[in-house]
Amino acid sequence: MDNLMVACCSKCNHSLSNPCKDYILCRTEGPICHDSKECKEKRETFIGKVDLAEDKPHRRVLICAGTGCISSGSKDVHSEMLAAVENAGIEDCEVTITGCHGFCEQGPIVIIEPEGIFYGGVSADDVEEIVEKQLKDGEIVERLLFTEPNSGEKDKYYRDIMFYKKQERTVLKNCGHINPEKIEEYIIAGGYRGLLRTLCDFKALEVIEQVKTSGLRGRGGAGFPTGLKWQFTAQAEGDQKYVVCNADEGDPGAFMDRSVLEGNPHAVIEGMLIAGYAVGASEGYVYVRAEYPLAIKRLQKAITQAEQFGILGDNILDSGFSFRLKIKAGAGAFVCGEETALLNSIEGERGMPRVRPPFPANKGLWQKPTLLNNVETYANVPIIMEKGGEWYASRGTEKSKGTKVFALTGKVNNTGLAEVPMGISMREIIFDIGGGINNGKKFKAVQIGGPSGGCLPEDKLDLPVDYDSLISAGAMMGSGGLVVMDETTCMVDLARFFLTFTQNESCGKCTPCREGTKRMLEILTRITEGEGQEGDIETLERMAKSVKNTSLCGLGQTAPNPILSTLRYFRDEYEAHIKKKWCPAGVCTALTTFKIDPEKCTGCRRCAKNCPVEAIKGEVKGIHEIDPEICTKCGTCMEKCKFEAVYKG
Amino acid sequence: MSEVTITIDGQEVTVPAGTTVLQAARMAGIEIPTLCHDPELTSPGACRLCVVEIEGMRNLPASCVTTAGDGMVVNTISPDVMDARKTVIELLLANHPEDCLTCERTGQCRLQEYAYHYGVRGDVFHGDRTEFPIDDSNPFIVRDLNKCIRCGKCVRVCDEVQGRSIYSFAYRGFDSIPATAMDESLAESECVFCGSCVSVCPTGALTEKMMHGVGRSWELEKIKTTCPYCGVGCNFDLNVKDGKVVGVTSNAESEVNGRALCVKGRFGYNFIDHPDRLTKPLIKKDGEFQEATWEEAINLVAEKFTQIKQEHGGDALALFSSARCTNEENYLANKFCRAVLGTNNIDHCARL
C-alpha cells in the first residue's frame, strides 16, 4: 500500500463502478468492511508519516510552494533539501511541498514538523545548515528565525509568531501544512468528512438549513446570505442546474482565493460537491483567472485525483449523487468577477454583465438555475457540514459569522493573509497581527475592500470588522483586501489610483461606468496635477452619486466608493490640493516644493552633488538652497541628506 | 393572464404580469427617455437613461429591464431621477462631437432631442474624446463611431433580426465600440448592407450615405409605398423632396417587413431618376433603336407573337417572368402564356 487511497487488500472492493459508502472513513479509521490487523497497520504507518507524533522520530520538512514563495526561490530550496536529506542519510524524514502560509514576505518559508519550527527567507544556500544543525542535531538555526518587528525577539515556533497568534485559521488551516497535490493528505487532515456527513445524514433541504443556520455570508464581497442563495437555486425549476465557483479574484493585493486553491484545493471541491447535492446540480465549473497558473494546475490535479478515487463522478460513495467539475480559465478581465459577466465568459461570450433579475439562481449558466459562490465561501462549507451550522454560528458577530481572510498589505510591518474571526477590530488586525506601521510612521487610513471599498481613518480603528459595520462606515468587506496607509499617503492620489483601476476595468456596457469613471478620473488627475478648480469637489460628489446609483453592475455601483470615502474622511486634503495648491502628504509632485531647513543644513554639499539638475546652490559649510525653478522634485536631495534638512513644503 | 397594478407618478396602472415598468409607464402615457431600448430587440439595460425610483429598491433601476410588480410605487420624475438622466446625457455629450450643425441626423437624433429636453449642454467636461476615422468604405452606409453612444442597437438588430451578427462589442471601457470582426471596415466585413443598423441607430453614427446633404429631415416628405423589387411586398417610406425621391427609410408600421429591408429596397432607388433609365419604348429600325409610342410597341409585339404562333406553333414561344412582379402579375403572365400564346414554356427568374 504505497498510497492511502488504494485498496489495502483484495477484500477492499471500492472502485469507480462499485463505490463504497465507507471509503473516506475507511482510509483513516479502517478497514471497516473486514477485520485485519495488518491492513490497519498499513494505514497507521502511512498516516504516521503525515500526521506526526511528537514521540516518534518522524520529521517533515515542509517547504512552501505557494506562488509567493516560489517566486522568491522555494523550488530551489525544495530540490536542494531533497538532495541534502538524502546525502546526509537521514531516515524518517520527509521533504514535501505545501501551499501558502500567507506570510509571503517571509518567503521562502520552511517549517520543521512536528515541532513547528518556522524558518523564513530560506535560500538554497541555507539548506545545508538546516540539515546539519536542525535535522541531524536538533539544533535551531537562529539566524533564520522570524524576528518580531516590535520586540525584536526571535520566535522559534510558528505558534509564537504574533502574525499568527490572533488568527483563527479555518479555511486556511491546511494551507502550509499539507501537500495540496496529494488527496490523501487532505483526507488525513480530516477532509471530505463534511461531504460524507452530507451524503449519509442529510437530505438536500436539510443541508440548506444547516448552511442557513451557520449564518455564512458570501465571502466574495457583497455578503449575501449563502444559505438563502442555495435555497433559491434549489427551488428554481430546471432539468439541469449548475454550481459555479468564482475564482476570478481580481482586487489588487487580494490573494486569499489563490492561496486556498493552491494550498487546499480539495476544500473547494468538497464545498462545491456539498452545494451540488443541496441544490440538485450535477455539473460544476470553477472560473479561475488565467493569471493563476499554479492554482489551475493544483486544482486540476485535485479534480483528477478526486475523480480517480470516486469522489467526483457518478454515484459518489454509493450515494446515488453524481457530480462533475470543470475548470474554465478567465482571460484577464476584472469585470468577470461579477457573477453574470463570469457566466457570459464561461459561455464564450464577451465578459459583460447581464441585467439582474433574473438572478443566476433562476437563469444562470446557459439560462439554467445556477449557484454561484466564491472560493472562500465554498471552502467554509465542509466544516459547517462536518461540525454543524450551530457550531459555525457560534463564532463571529450577530450578523457576520465565522472567519474572514484578509490580505493585509501596505505600510504595515507584517503583510500577508490573515484569517480572523468576524468582529475583530481593525486595530487588532493592523497593530497586533500586522505589527503596526513600519518605519515608525503614523497610521493614516486603511483601504478595505479593494477598488470597490472605502478608506477608513484612525477614529474607525476600533470598528468591529463585519459586513454591516463596514458598510455603515462607507467601506465594504469586498474580497478582503486591506491596504494600510501612513502619513505619507495622499488620499486624493489614492482615490486616483483606484479610479484608474476601475476605469481601466470597466467593460464599457453602461454609460455611467464607462463615461463616468473616465470623467471622475480626469478630475482627480487634474487635482493631483495642481490644476484643480473651484467646484471640482461638488462635481465629483454629484458624479459619484450618479454613477453609484445608476450603474448596471457592482463594478460601476462601487467604483465611486474610494472617492466618496476619502471625501467623507479627508475632505480637507482635497481642499488643500485645490485651494492651497498643496499636497499635505507631499506625494503629488506638482504640489510639492522641496526646501532646505537652514537650522539643520551643515553645508556638506551632499544634496548639491547628487542633484541631477543642479538646482541646489550653496558653499561648503554654508547653508544650501533649492531653486524651485530648476528643481524637478525628484526627491534625491531628501534621500541623500544625512541631517534630515530637506523637507517638503 | 394575470395582471398587476402599479403606481407610477401617483397614477395607478394595471398591466399584464410580466410587463416592464417602462412599458407600463408608456401605456399610462408617461414618457420615459430611452436610448438603448427597442421594443423589437432584447433589452441590455445599458444606457441607463430610463432609470426610475422604485420604493424599497436599492439605487435607481433601469425601467426597461425591471418587471412591474404588484403594488410597486414608481417615481419617474424625482429629483434623483432627473439628476441621473441629466448626468447620463452630460456624459454622453462629453464624448460626442459638437457637430449638430452639419450632422445628417439632426432633427431625428435622440441624443439631440434629450439634450434639448433636459437642458443639457455639452460643456460640463472637457476631457478626452475617442477619435475614430470615418468608415465610408462602401456606397451605402457611413459609419462614424465618433458619434456612437454604445447603445448596442446595431449589434442586436444585426444579430437578433437580420441574423448576420456583423457587429460585436470590442475593446473595453471607454474604448469599447461596436466593431466588425477584426475591426475591419464594413466593406471588408461580411455585411450585406441591409441597413437595419442604420434604421435603429439613435444618433448620427450610422447614416445612409446617399442621403447625405440632400435635405434636412423636416424638409422631407415621407410617402409609404411598396418596394418594387420583389414579390415579398415590403413597405418603406420614400423620402421625397421637391418631388424627387432622395432616400428610402424604414417604416416601422410596415405589416410585412417592419423595419427590415434588403440592400436593394433600401439603397437601390437611384434608378428612378437615372439618365440611363428607359422611359419610352424603343423599336429597332434600320439597325438602330428609335423612340416609339406604347401603342406602336405593343402592336408590334402582338403582331410578331401572332406571326410566330401561326407559322411555328405556340411552343416556338416562351415567357420569362420576374420575381420583381407581384403574385397577381405573375398569375396574369401565366394565363397569358398558356391561354393566349398556347404554350407551357413559362419560367421566371427567382432572383432580382
Image (tube, coloured by chain):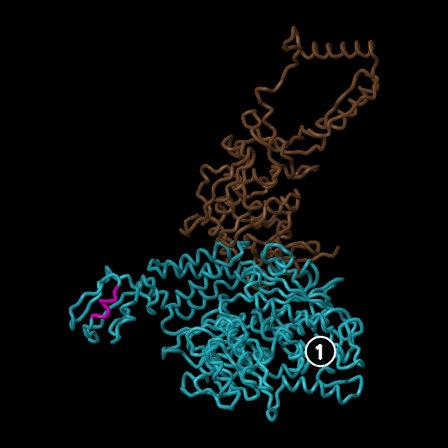
Chain colours: A cyan, B brown
User: Can see residue A218?
Assistant: yes
Left or right: A272 as drawn, with respect to A532: right
Q: Dot 1, how many residues are within 10 Å of its Cα: few (below 14), some (14-19), or many (20+)?
A: many
Residue A38 pos. (x, y %): 75, 88
Along the viewing direction, whichever of B280 and B74 lies nearer the viewer: B280
Residue at (72% x, 56% y) in the render: B3
Range covered by the magenta-colored residues: A605-611
Residue reaching furthest bottom? A55
| Amino acid on which the number 1 mark rests in the picture | Met
Quadrant of the rendering where the C terminus of chain A is positioned: bottom left
> Which picture quadrant has residue B323?
top right
Q: Is mark 1 on a helix, strand or loop?
A: loop
Residue B131 pos. (x, y %): 45, 46
Along the viewing direction, whichever of A529 and B73 lies nearer the viewer: A529
Quadrant of the rendering where the N terminus of chain A is positioned: bottom right
- Above or below residue A188? Residue B147 is above
Q: Mark 1 points at which residue?
A: A5
- Above or below residue A42? Residue A622 is above
> Which picture quadrant has residue B284?
top right
- Above or below residue A612? Residue A428 is below
Left or right: A251 as drawn, with respect to B166: left
Along the viewing direction, whichever of A610 and A486 lies nearer the viewer: A610
